[in-house]
């Protein structure tokens, strides 16, 4: 079956595995110290290549500064063709505009694999990271320059993309975003405007008591600092090493369009304010609960979870959560109480109660619980929630309480409910304490969902309600389709625009995934219609403009799976489909240098 979406004009650009760059000098090096000396004496635009092979204890420290238009490139001869073993690692010190590309780290010992000290515009791309160690090691670290207390060398605008991080077995993080402090630690600033995207994080475990997050952004004493970090389009699978899969401990960061599959723990807004969590997919994937035994021999149950929230002024919108087993800290949406109030406590390591939080347009389906409110950790968290808005969410499940007030801590008027749809089935109940809602707060009605391509999506019978938000406009849904002010509740709007955000698979991220970007330039003359829908054997295109010359079908990872010419002047085309894997594909029409594309789904039986 092929489901086609309404045409939205975009230009699709496919960028191959090798980065495009201006190539000036290009030299080969087989020794880390020689490479270091050459790079540090380089001119902007120079390219340094390590020939394919295996190298032990390959170490380099770079201090070069290039330019945005002519970066220095340090790369493997081919992506994945160079394996670095032993104590191999790279350090960047007060460096700028350098690209590190294509290495396989299969290292041992106790070195951070790539460390950035006071750097900006460093790109770490298309590498594979694996480290065998018994120590607590941060694999990729972005921070300040050691013992330099001037903020001139505060890190910023670095990118970590299209890498694989795998098989972490000891404490430390796959990626740490740190920062710079003054000499007496009264002013601590996070590295700013860093981007972590299109990476594959897999097999982080077993569970440690602490300090084994896959990504940590900031830390408690830095939590008042603004990071403006963006974490997007990453895939996390079996990342179980810490109760926090991603730990956000600073302000003004964005976590969006990621996929979390079969991970024990949560995306945790642990410290900091004004963070945004948007458009993420969370799947329990049938993973059974686990057990963690601490150093004192006490055992506890660990679960697949969603989002845990502390701090102020966060926005949680357009997230999809299915099959999660978590409760308490690991609930799909966990609003525990706190042991501190923002602005009233000097200890920044506390659990600051959630205040002025917006939770809107999220879909929670078939989880063990729904939204959990008020857990007080055996009386240790006595500070109740304040000014929470829960609006236009869709929650349905067949067990336990869909709204679970923990430890008898009902927040009363501190939580405002608007235009939600909550539908208990099976043995599930609406609320744990038997309380109810007005119809304007919660409609208890069948949301009419249907399963499409593995997701529970709205149908024409899904209730459409006006936005209950007065200070926030939600103009897109989880798929990045336009969302009108009157739309279906939950993460997904039943729209006709091109779908641009879907659950990620391993082939969509990492070193061999193609990078797909969009631009606003397009030709209004390149038109077409796709049908039938559903279909399984062929596609039929009609209403083709005379300028169309060819049609191609691409996987999301950029692989061309079909190409066909269009007869000049033809207004229709029948395409016999090859046997394809179920999933999403771009169908692209090209004509006289102009492009138009839509995203289709393929479900061949």
Image (cartoon, rainbow, N blue to C red):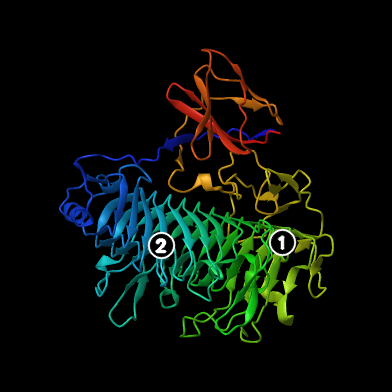
Place of residue 456 in the rendered image (x, y in percent of width and height, measured from the top left): 71, 49
**Real-space CA distance between mark 1 and mark 2, rounded to the nearest whole angstrom:** 35 Å
Dot 2: element: strand
Q: Nearer the viewer, mark 1 or mark 2?
A: 2
Observer-nearest of 455 and 54: 54
Q: Is residue 149 visible?
A: yes
Q: Is residue 66 left or right of residue 496?
A: left
Q: Residue at x 67, y 78 (%)?
A: 375
Q: Residue at x 80, y 75 (%)?
A: 433
Place of residue 114 in the rendered image (x, y in percent of width and height, measured from the top left): 34, 60
Dot 1: element: loop
Residue 243's place in the image compared with 455, above or below, is: below
In the rendered image, which quarter is residue 285 located in?
A: bottom right
Q: Residue at x 33, y 55 (%)?
A: 84
Place of residue 490 in the rendered image (x, y in percent of width and height, measured from the top left): 68, 54
Residue 367 circle label: 1
Q: Is residue 179 left or right of residue 476?
A: left
Observer-nearest of 563 and 80: 80
In the rendered image, which quarter is residue 8 located in?
A: top right
Circle nearer the N terminus (1, 2):
2
Q: Is residue 379 left or right of residue 157?
A: right
Label 2: few (<14), some or many (≥20) within 10 Å?
many
Residue 596's place in the image compared with 208, above or below, is: above
In the rendered image, which quarter is residue 94 located in?
A: bottom left
> Disc 2 designates what residue?
131
Observer-nearest of 33 and 599: 33
């Amino acid at each position: 079956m092929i489901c086609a979406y309404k045409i939205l004009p975009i230009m699709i650009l496919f960028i191959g595995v090798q980065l495009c760059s201006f190539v000036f000098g290009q030299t080969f090096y087989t020794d880390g110290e020689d490479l270091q000396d050459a790079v540090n004496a380089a001119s902007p635009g120079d390219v340094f290549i390590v020939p394919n092979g295996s190298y032990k204890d390959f170490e380099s420290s770079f201090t070069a500064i290039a330019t945005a238009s002519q970066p220095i490139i340090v790369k493997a001869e081919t992506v994945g063709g160079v394996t670095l073993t032993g104590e191999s690692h790279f350090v960047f010190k007060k460096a700028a505009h350098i690209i590190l590309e294509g290495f396989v780290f299969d290292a041992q010992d106790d070195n951070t694999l790539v460390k950035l000290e006071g750097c900006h515009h460093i790109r770490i791309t298309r590498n594979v990271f694996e480290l065998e160690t018994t120590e607590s090691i941060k694999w990729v670290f972005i921070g300040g320059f050691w013992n330099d207390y001037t903020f001139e060398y505060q890190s910023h605008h670095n990118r970590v993309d299209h890498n694989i991080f795998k098989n972490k077995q000891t404490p430390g993080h796959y990626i740490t975003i740190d920062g710079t402090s003054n000499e007496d630690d009264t002013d601590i600033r996070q590295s700013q405007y860093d981007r972590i995207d299109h990476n594959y994080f897999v097999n982080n475990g077993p569970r440690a008591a602490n300090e084994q997050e896959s990504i940590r952004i900031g830390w408690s004493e830095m939590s008042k600092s603004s990071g403006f970090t963006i974490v997007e389009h990453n895939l996390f699978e079996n990342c179980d090493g810490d109760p926090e899969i991603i730990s956000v401990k600073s302000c003004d960061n964005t976590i969006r369009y990621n996929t979390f599959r079969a991970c024990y723990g949560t995306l945790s807004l642990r410290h900091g304010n004004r963070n945004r969590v948007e458009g993420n997919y969370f799947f329990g994937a049938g993973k059974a609960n686990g057990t963690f035994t601490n150093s004192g021999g006490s055992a506890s149950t660990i679960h697949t979870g969603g989002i845990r929230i502390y701090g102020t002024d966060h926005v949680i919108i357009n997230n999809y959560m299915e099959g999660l087993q978590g409760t308490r800290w690991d609930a799909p949406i966990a609003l525990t109480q706190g042991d501190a109030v923002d602005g009233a406590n000097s200890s920044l390591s506390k659990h600051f109660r959630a205040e002025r939080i917006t939770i809107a347009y999220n879909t929670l389906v078939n989880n063990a619980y729904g939204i959990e409110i008020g857990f007080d950790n055996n009386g240790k968290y006595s500070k109740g929630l304040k000014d929470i808005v829960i609006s236009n969410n869709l929650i349905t499940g067949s067990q336990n309480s869909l709204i679970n007030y923990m430890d008898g801590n009902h927040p009363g008027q501190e939580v405002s409910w608007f235009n939600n749809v909550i539908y208990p089935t099976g043995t599930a109940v609406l609320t744990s304490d038997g309380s109810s809602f007005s119809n304007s707060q919660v409609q208890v009605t069948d949301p009419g969902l249907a399963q499409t391509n593995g997701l529970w999506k709205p149908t024409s019978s899904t209730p459409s309600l006006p936005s209950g938000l007065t200070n926030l406009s939600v103009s897109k849904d989880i798929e990045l389709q336009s969302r009108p002010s009157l739309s279906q509740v939950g993460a997904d709007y039943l729209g006709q625009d091109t779908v641009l955000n879907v659950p990620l698979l391993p082939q969509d991220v990492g070193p061999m995934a193609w990078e797909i970007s969009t631009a606003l330039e397009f030709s209004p003359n390149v038109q077409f219609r796709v049908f039938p829908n559903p279909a399984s054997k062929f596609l039929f295109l009609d209403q083709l403009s005379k300028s169309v010359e060819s049609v191609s079908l691409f996987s999301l990872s950029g692989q061309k799976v079909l190409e066909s010419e269009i007869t000049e002047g033809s207004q229709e085309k029948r395409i016999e489909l090859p046997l394809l894997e179920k999933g999403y594909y771009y169908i692209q029409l090209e004509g006289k240098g102009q492009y138009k594309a839509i995203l289709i789904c393929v479900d061949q039986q």
